[in-house]
Amino acid sequence: MFLRIARASVLFLFVLGLTVRPAAAGPIDRVEPPFWWQGFEHQELQIMIHGHGAAGFDVSIDYPGVTLNRVEQVESENYLFLYLDIDAAAEPGTFDIVLEDDGARVVHAYELRQKNTDPAHAAGFSGADTIYLITPDRFSNGDASNDTIGGLGDPLNRSDDYGRHGGDLAGIRNSLDYIADMGYTAVWLNPILENAMPEASYHGYATTDYYRVDPRFGSNADYREFVASAKAKGLGTIMDMITNHCGSEHWWMRDVPNPDWFNFYKDYHQTSSAKATIFDPYGSEYDRKIYFDGWYVPAMPDLNQRNPLLADYLVQNAIWWVEYLGLTGIRLDTYGFSDKDFLSEWTRRIMQEYPNFTITGEETGKNPALLAYWQRGKKNHDGYVSWLPSLLDFPMFHGVNEALTKEVPWWDSPWTRAYETLATDFVYPDPMNLVIFPDNHDRSRIFTKVGENYDLYRMAIVYYLTMRGIPQIYYGTEVLMSHTRDDGNHGEIRAEFPGGWSDHEKNAFTGRGLSDQERQAQEFMRTLLNWRKGKSVIHSGRLMQFTPIKYVYAYFRYNDDETVMVVFNRGEEAVPLETARFAERLGDSTHATDVLTGRRINIESAIDLEPMSVMILEVD
């Protein structure tokens, strides 16, 4: 999610010199949220009004079922925060917000819509899903007319790893048949809200308008149509959101509501990223402040969610997008860097309105106890209560990476770290609801990580598509996308998807130009994903793992009706694996079918494991 630090430092110097926004042409230039819905459990609505001298206006509303409870003012004279009560009896329609001052009168028509009551509108995702993660700017250019937009910096520059390349919503929408055919059931898009930054804005993590899709990706209506089109093909949509920070070119920076709208405003401190301060019983308040309030990078001002007006704004913004789009889930960026109490309330409010919804948080720590602290249902030592259903399972990510890449002494197994990480699942309230992944937009691609060893790649994919949890696959992993440097060069990791641009020699959508191994990997992924779609034993079955012995590691997924054995041999030699030690799960079974080859195998006494191999066995 990072911008280039060197460039960002220049931006920060600019930010500190900004002054108050010049006078607007009229008394109102922004009303956010732009409309709302009747029928929410939480009936209070905050409306932020911005315009030159807006604080000097008296406000009135006359509409049955809508009551103006209070008006909040801030240090800037250009804001009003209205708090309305939307009674359950209020009818959908349009009401006037009337602003008056010394004879001047401004009327803003505000729309109140009917909330969608269909449970499928925001149903959430689960272990039955497999998520396809896409960086929109790098996947497919479906509309060349929006590649460069007047008034926005950072024009198209495909020769720059950190430049805009032109991918958009239209390109992804045109590719939905491919995504569905591969066997995915949900699509997670890296952020697509406006990033009006002068450069390196393609990734979307420096929001400059929380209610507007960046026009280089499309429009709000395009986003809504994309979600509907995806849903029609059996694909849910997960929206990437950011509450920790915004971009330095956000319009708030030109007219800050209050100095405490941002942490360390005009006194830059970078976050320590010392995650242990979150739950350290011996930690200092100073260290906690630097961790929570410090900025990620200078071009991303850190938002102060302890400000109640900002907290309400961010909560409502999330609910607005869920309802407007009909989302399947939210992935919250940099979870744990925002204020703890705010995170609890933010998740509680969303789950209050959508009880079957799914929110997953990005917590990159290696320690399972850190993730568990944030998950809903955890009884924490300090009394902290979380409502977050899911997190990205970074401890598993690190453990499996080590299992596939590390050489170990003769008396140990490379699988030990993965095995022991999984053994700590007891710390989680709900380990089955964690999102698991071999790579993503911030981490080296798995094919690069394993030294472009196809056998190790296959092991990684099998592991994540048969393990407990909700698997996420990064775009291009199915065709062995890699990069030249395993050094965290995010621009290179997020390369263009083959076939997403008309000048590509390779086309992963059609198979044109792919190497034999790339075609093989794509078909391997397609077969495994579509097999997984129909396997409740993988979605929600129980899990039993057996201690790894040298290069061999095995685990089982099982329920009352099915048993699946997954076994790995990371060694360079064939191994006859005796099956007597697995009697707890195999019972009297004598045969199994290998999902990857279709072969029937006798498992009565032993299984012959080929060198550098993995098997998925459906036990009779």
Image: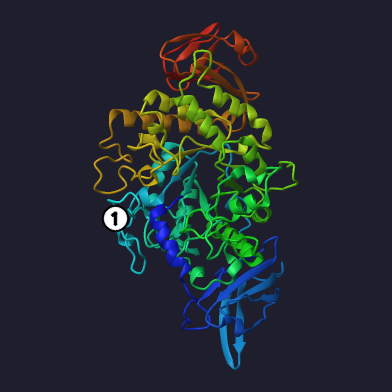
Evaluate whether residue 173 shows in this view: no
Q: Most extreme residue toward the bottom, as rendered?
A: 103
Considering depth in this image, is 383 or 188 the residue closer to the camera?
Answer: 383
Q: Quadrant of residue 96?
A: bottom right
- Image location of residue 38, percent across then percent down: 65, 66
**Lateral position of residue 48 relative to residue 200, left or right:** right
- 564 relative to 365, above or below: above
Q: Residue at point 32% right, 28% down?
A: 517
The residue to which callout 1 is attached is 157
Q: Residue at point 42% right, 11% down?
A: 573
- Image location of residue 331, percent across then percent down: 54, 48
Q: Residue at point 55% right, 47% down?
A: 273
Evaluate whether residue 522 shows in this view: yes
Quadrant showing the C terminus: top right
> In this figure, which colouring scheme has been used for the structure?
rainbow
- Image location of residue 119, percent across then percent down: 63, 51
Considering depth in this image, is 168 or 23 the residue closer to the camera?
Answer: 23
**Lateral position of residue 507 relative to residue 490, left or right:** left
Total labels: the figure holds 1
- Image location of residue 485, percent across then percent down: 35, 37
Name the kind of residue labelled 1 in the image: Asn
**Lateral position of residue 600 relative to residue 480, left or right:** right
- How many C-alpha atoms fall within 10 Å of the one at disc 1: few (<14), some, or many (≥20)? some
Q: Secondary structure at mark 1?
A: loop
Q: Most extreme residue toward the top, as rendered?
A: 605
- 121 relative to 484, above or below: below
